[in-house]
Image: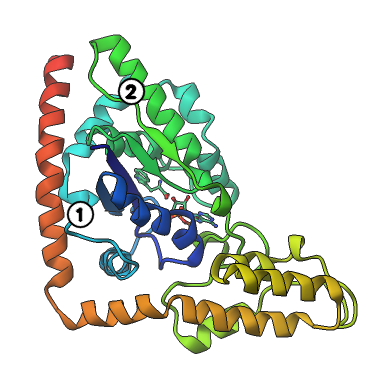
Amino acid sequence: MPRIISGIQSSGVLHIGNYFGMIQPAIALQAEGEAFYFIANYHALTSVRDPNVLRENSRRVALDFLACGFDPDRGALFMQTDVPQVTELAWILSTVAPMGLLERAHSYKDKLAHGMTASAGLFTYPVLMAADILIYDSDIVPVGKDQKQHIEITRDLAVKMNETFGQIFKLPEPRIRAATETVPGVDGQKMSKSYGNTIDIFGDEKETRKRVMSIVTDSKPVDEPKDPATSTIFQLFSLVGSKDEIAVMGERFRKGGAGYGDFKKQLFEKLWEYFSPMRKRREEILADKLYVDNVLVRGAGRANEVANDVMTRVRAAVGL
Ligand code: ADP
Ligand code: TRP
């Protein structure tokens, strides 16, 4: 049975870009193998500096992931920090990681371009991510497109280790869902918590409506035909509407006679309805105070079993 692994940083609140780009495909993949999904709180430390915020976000990401449909009986959900051996493996990998490989990482350059301070942790972020993946003998890694290069770096590091020390690691494959590889935010750029353009999965009704109504459009008047292909409203609607509903909206765009305000209202209604079963599930989980903790303890137990085996192999291979 293939092992499927993915992580999500607890650096903020989950948004619908995270949902369609990673959470939903990852949850669907549970049917194909043994899923190991974790809350990447070591990684989140590269951007969050308030301990209470980090703790709270980490719990909330676990809760939200479960509310989105993760089945803890068919896989493990755990905190990255509950398998601290990944930091040991990250160190070992860093001793073979070529500087040039890390210097080419887009994500690092992007983060600096968006005003983050260059730290050693931010620079070696992909090495810790490689450790996360390799320590579970992973086969498949479902992520959004922006993480593709990190999986390539992981494969490069695995090959380098295998060439240097003999066959230690499996080579993981990324799984990127083409249809939702980049979900746009309210400003039309990639939706990202660091760009302040998100629509949250579990935002309250008023806030969610406000976010949808703030989607940036061109200034075409009501009567004029509009191009659905270039519209953020239409792209987001395509994620939540039925095939027929999407076709009807596309037609109304092209015909003219309806304004963007109308389309936004329709998008809000559909979005709100789409996430309604997950909101309900979230309330049920919240009512059981120990549910999330129990899932995380169980998940960490399973993850540690695999990680300990792999680390025994790694230490022996490198001479530690
Ligand atoms: P953010 O950009 O908001 O900080 P993360 O980097 O924490 O999001 O991403 C978590 C997961 O969600 C990753 O697998 C990432 O590829 C995916 N993801 C994030 N934003 C989007 C988006 N706008 N479209 C598709 N996938 C996304
Ligand atoms: N870097 C990923 C992100 O920002 C999160 C992550 C950490 C991850 N470790 C991972 C994803 C291992 C997949 C596999 O979204």
248, above or below 175, in the image:
below
Which residue is denoted by mark 1 in the rendering? 74
Quadrant assignment, res 141: top left
Quadrant assignment, res 183: bottom right
**Residue at left 48%, top 44%?**
176
Helix, strand or loop at label 1? It is: loop
**Residue at left 29%, top 10%?**
164
Indicate the quadrant containing the C terminus: top left, top right, bottom left or bottom right: top left
Q: CA distance from mark 1 to mark 2?
A: 27 Å
Q: Which mark is residue 317?
A: none
Kindly tell me whether residue 123 is visible in this rendering: no
57, above or below 312, in the image:
below
Mark 1 and ligand 2: say if the CB distance to the nearest ligand atom is below 8 Å.
no
Colour scheme of the picture: rainbow
Which of discs 1 and 2 lies nearer the camera? The answer is 1
Q: Percent x, y for residue 62?
A: 27, 64
Q: Nearer the viewer, residue 91 or 117?
A: 91
**Dot 2: few (<14), some (14–19), or many (≥20) neighbours within 10 Å?**
many
- Asked if the residues shown at circle 1 and circle 2 are in contact, with their CB atoms under 8 angstroms apart, the answer is no
Label 1 sits on what residue type? Arg
Q: Percent x, y for residue 64?
A: 32, 69
Q: Is 31 left or right of 11, judged from the image as shown?
A: left
Q: Which mark is residue 158?
A: 2
Kindly tell me whether residue 19 is visible in this rendering: yes
13, above or below 317, in the image:
below
Q: Nearer the viewer, residue 212 or 50?
A: 212
Q: Is 196 left or right of 57, judged from the image as shown?
A: right
